[in-house]
Image (cartoon, rainbow, N blue to C red):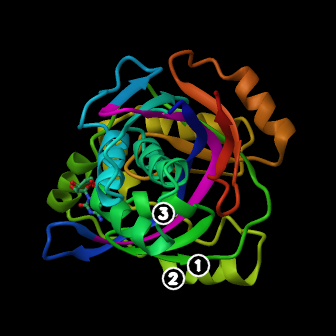
Amino acid sequence: MSEEIIVTAPAKINLALDIIGLRADGYHQLEMIMQSISLHDKIKIKKEKSNIKLKCSDPELPEDKSNLAYQAAELILNRGDIQEGVCIYIDKRIPVAAGLAGGSSDAAAVLTGINKLYKLNLDNDELYKLATEIGSDVPFCLEGGTALATGRGDQLKQLSDLKKYYMIIVTPPVSVSTRYIYQQYDQLKIESNISVSRLAKLIENEKNINWDEGWANVLEKITSKLVKDIKIIKKKLKKMGAKFTLMSGSGPSVFAITDGYEQAFKIKEKWDRTDDFIDIAWNIKRNLQTCEESINIH
Ligand code: C5P
């Protein structure tokens, strides 16, 4: 009974994000380019005789059904008709409610982890269906890499791998509700002309991104009005030499593309806004969210 598995749950950034309409189900019709990055949570999942237990290194996080990782465990155990349970421990490194899909990625990792731990053999289509029930970003997090996401964010087209870009991730100490940001978007009726499909074609044609080609996030205008730190952080990153900065998802995290590891390292070393989360990261390829180790204790 003491088998356990350790899985990694990478964060994502949005290289582009546009809203093209409102759907009948109340969700927004999106066009986004999603990219998984090296920043990740680590999750240990252990077989238990019964029930789901969730523990998290960050005491602020809920350890009940309101946590997406808990919902993922419940869904897949039911789907696999498993009577036993699991104990899940999340070593949280991705900032919470920050536009980096940390909770969604944890949920995706729990789905793939339990699928392996209990040898359920659910195929990608079945995992995808469970993922869409949990949240719009969860399907992308199952495989990661670089993808064009449309619909609610759950219709995915994999794109070619990009070359390795070293970046800096900065999150000011403010959490943002995705739902609230979308509501504000509806009220403010912001116009945008981000050509996400054109940008996706650019990725297909050349792995070297020209950051002057109109990479943008329509939600940045909304969240920046509420979180003044975003503009300040972007300006500071540019001043320190970053070539491109953008808010990720509904924010407030900002990523900054640098010239390479050395520049990223220097920016991190010199960062003097002590309350911010800051880390160096890089884009990672598809399917890197695989089980790292599988341990049989007895
Ligand atoms: O799907 P998920 O639960 O992660 O979405 C969180 C919230 O973000 C939704 O309740 C909704 O308000 C908003 N949302 C949206 N349109 C999308 C994705 C999310 O309006 N395509």
Few, some or many residues within 10 Å of mark 1 (<14, 14–19, 20+):
many
Tell me, yes or no, if residue 44 can be seen here: yes
Magenta region = 29-52
Q: Amino acid at mark 1?
A: Ala
What residue did someone put label 3 on?
A: 140
Whether the residues at callouts 1 and 2 have beta carbons within 8 Å, the answer is yes
First in sequence: mark 3 or mark 1? Answer: 3
Mark 2, other Cα within 10 Å: few <14 / some 14–19 / many ≥20: some
Which residue is label 2 attached to?
A: 197
Q: Provide the major secondary structure of the magenta segment.
A: strand
Residue 83 locus on image (x, y percent) = 31, 45
Q: Is residue 72 left or right of residue 230?
A: left
**Residue 41 belongs to magenta span:** yes
- Measured in 3D between alpha carbons, the distance from the residue under mark 1 to the one under mark 2, in whole angstroms, is 5 Å
Give the numbered dot on residue 200: 1
Image quarter where ligand 1 lies: bottom left
* Residue 25 rendering spot, x and y as whole percentages: 14, 71
- Residue 58 found in image quarter: top left
As measured in the structure, the alpha-carbon distance from the residue carrying label 2 to the one carrying label 3 is 17 Å
Q: Nearer the viewer, residue 225 or 165?
A: 165
Q: Secondary structure at mark 2?
A: helix
Residue 91, placed above or below residue 247: above
Q: Is residue 5 left or right of residue 196?
A: right
Residue type, label 3: Phe
Residue that appears at 33% across and 39% down: 70
CB within 8 Å, label 2 to label 3 = no
